[in-house]
Image (cartoon, grey):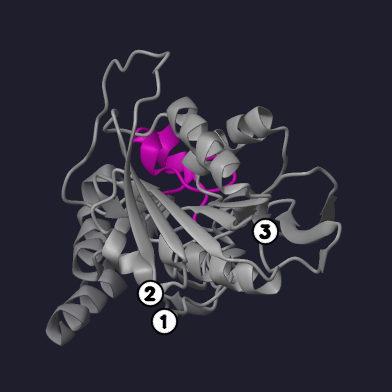
Amino acid sequence: MSILLFAESQQGKLKKGSYELCSYGFALAQQQNTSLTIVTINCEETDQLAQYGALKLINLKANVGYFEANTYASALVDIAKSEQSKIIVISSSADAKYMGGILAGKLQAGYVTNVVELPSTSEPLTVKHSVFSNKAFANTTLTGKIHIIGLASNVLEETTQSSSTTVEQQDTQVAIKCTQSSVEQIQGKATIADADVVVSGGRGLKGPENWGLIEDLADVLGAATACSKPVSDMGWRPHSEHVGQTGKPVATNLYIAVGISGAIQHIAGVNASKVKVVINTDPEAPFFKAADYGIVGDAFEVLPKLTEKLKARS
């Protein structure tokens, strides 16, 4: 009857949000007066999860080297049944949301994404989650026999625990009913989903030839690069870098917006970031109202100086 938690990894490395997720899972297990079982797939860093209070850690060696929602969901269904888990915890990443719907269907479970805190009641289970692009909160009661909680990013601090964790290595051979055509992975750069820092540029940079300013700052910070919708629409940057409500959501520790005025859709998509810094020449730019820190100035003057200062400190 343990809490079952799925910690995501990529190329054998745990994703950034997995540690926060495990902290939540342990707190949830304590609240529900039960134990925590953590499941990973093709992960090479399982020893790092032993300090998050899990009684059992199951690392599956799947016959796929990439994320495949049906395969992963089927594997978790089998473990949930063997562990008799009534509550399953996953992240609210794009992959996890895709898998979560399949998992809920297979288990006939209730599923809520973007949960921001521990349940307020246990019988029935009631969870608080963000809605309307993080502009409001709702309390949803899950009435089924099995519940799936999708935790939002950056909602609690990571906490480690001392526990005696049993690590189980298991092989899973789940039939894949799809064909992989190609997977394109950019090496050596942080991804928007997993980066602690994201540096984003808008039309204020005046053209793709000036994007080196964004990339130089991102390199110093070990950050991912992103852009506003108009920038990707004009072909200055690939659509894979488009962030906001109509692009990729961002829930990072630090989001730096350069030359972005702050359309409501853009702000809604990055609002979950802990700290937002805005650099813009227009003191009336809407983004300043949502920012934690603001610099009114020309990006062509501010960014080189900021980059040099950061290089000197590193």
Q: Earlier in the sequence, mark 2 or mark 3?
A: 2
Dots 3 and 1: beta carbons under 8 Å? no
Q: Residues within 10 Å of mark 3 (few under 14, many from 20)?
A: many
Please report the residue visible at 56 percent of the width from the left and 50 percent of the height from the top. Answer: 92
Depth check: give the residue in front, 58 or 261.
Answer: 58
> What's the residue type where badge 2 is placed?
Gln
Q: Identify the residue at horizontal 38%, vertical 43% (top origin).
A: 241
Secondary structure beneath dot 2 equals helix
In this rendering, the answer to whether 248 lies above or below 280 is above
* Image x and y of residue 253, in percent: 44, 70
Q: Which residue is mark 1?
A: 162
Residue 126: mark in rendering: none
Q: Position of residue 267 (x, y in %)?
A: 59, 57
- Marker disc for residue 115: 3
Res 196 seen here: no
User: Residue 239 magenta-drawn?
Assistant: yes
Q: Earlier in the sequence, mark 3 or mark 1?
A: 3
From the image, which quarter does the C terminus lie in? bottom left
Nearer to us: label 3 or label 1: 1
> Is 147 rendered above or below residue 153?
above
**Relative to the observer, which residue lies in front, 292 or 182?**
182
Q: Which residue is mark 2?
A: 51
Looking at the rendering, the stretch of residues picked out in magenta corresponds to 227-250
The answer to which quarter of the image holds residue 259 is bottom left
Q: Give the CA distance from mark 1 to mark 2.
A: 6 Å
Check contact, mark 1 vs mark 2: CB within 8 A.
yes
